Image (cartoon, helix red, strand yellow):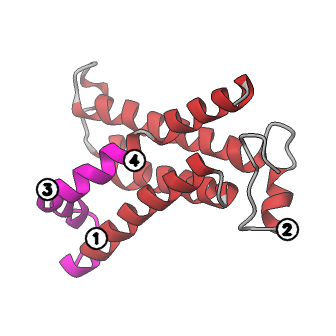
């Protein structure tokens, strides 16, 4: 494997490690807690269960697609949307009322988590558009296509 392929694999693993295995495992092993958090945003509870299962699927299959290079642009686009949606739904720093209270306030902590979600989503968008900027057109032309990140074409 070339050094460029190792770098690509390392970067892709770094992007998804939060989701697979950690967040996905947390959802599986801490289902009740994850469902309670989800139910704060989505009611009724069966809808929260459905949304949580969708999130779990996105985390597992999106991460696998990105790491393996299988339909990786589509997987990265979905993961970017997921990061944005979770930032807006669960990192609502503006709703705490204590954002200006100081660096240890809940609002300030959520603000940093919000920015981290957006930054991670931006990293996924780099996979979508590619370094040359032509990836979005390629995604639209072949949604299930691969970027062949490790050199095999």
Q: Which mark is residue 7?
A: none
User: Is residue 112 left or right of 133 when viewed as pictured?
Assistant: left
User: Is residue 153 left or right of 48 when viewed as pictured?
Assistant: right
Q: Pick out the residue farthest to the top.
A: 103
Image point (48%, 50%), residue name:
83
Does the magenta segment cover residue 38? yes
Q: Which residue is mark 3?
A: 33
Q: Which residues are magenta?
A: 20-47
Image coords of residue 74 (percent x, y): 66, 61
Q: Which mark is residue 20?
A: 4
Q: Pick out the residue farthest to the front.
A: 1
Tag in front: 3 or 1: 3
Tag in front: 4 or 3: 4
Give the Cα distance between marks 1 and 2.
Answer: 35 Å
Q: Which mark is residue 141?
A: 2
Image point (57%, 30%), residue name:
10
Q: Which of pointers 1 and 2 lies earlier in the amino acid sequence?
A: 1
SS at mark 1?
A: loop
Q: Which residue is mark 1?
A: 42
Give the Cα distance between marks 1 and 4.
Answer: 23 Å
Q: Nearer the viewer, residue 128 or 64?
A: 64
Q: Which of pointers 3 and 1 lies earlier in the amino acid sequence?
A: 3
């Amino acid at each position: 494997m070339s050094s460029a392929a190792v770098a690509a694999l390392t970067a892709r693993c770094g992007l998804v490690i939060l989701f697979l295995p950690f967040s996905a495992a947390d959802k599986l092993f801490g289902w009740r807690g994850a469902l309670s958090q989800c139910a704060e945003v989505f009611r009724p509870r069966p809808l929260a269960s459905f949304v949580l299962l969708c999130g779990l699927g996105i985390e597992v299959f999106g991460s696998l697609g990105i790491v393996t290079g299988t339909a990786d642009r589509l997987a990265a686009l979905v993961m970017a949307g997921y990061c944005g949606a979770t930032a807006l739904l669960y990192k609502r720093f503006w709703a705490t009322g204590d954002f200006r209270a100081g660096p240890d306030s809940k609002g300030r902590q959520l603000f940093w988590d919000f920015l981290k979600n957006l930054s991670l989503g931006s990293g996924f968008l780099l996979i979508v558009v590619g370094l040359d900027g032509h990836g979005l057109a390629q995604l639209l032309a072949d949604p299930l296509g691969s970027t062949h990140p490790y050199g095999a074409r």
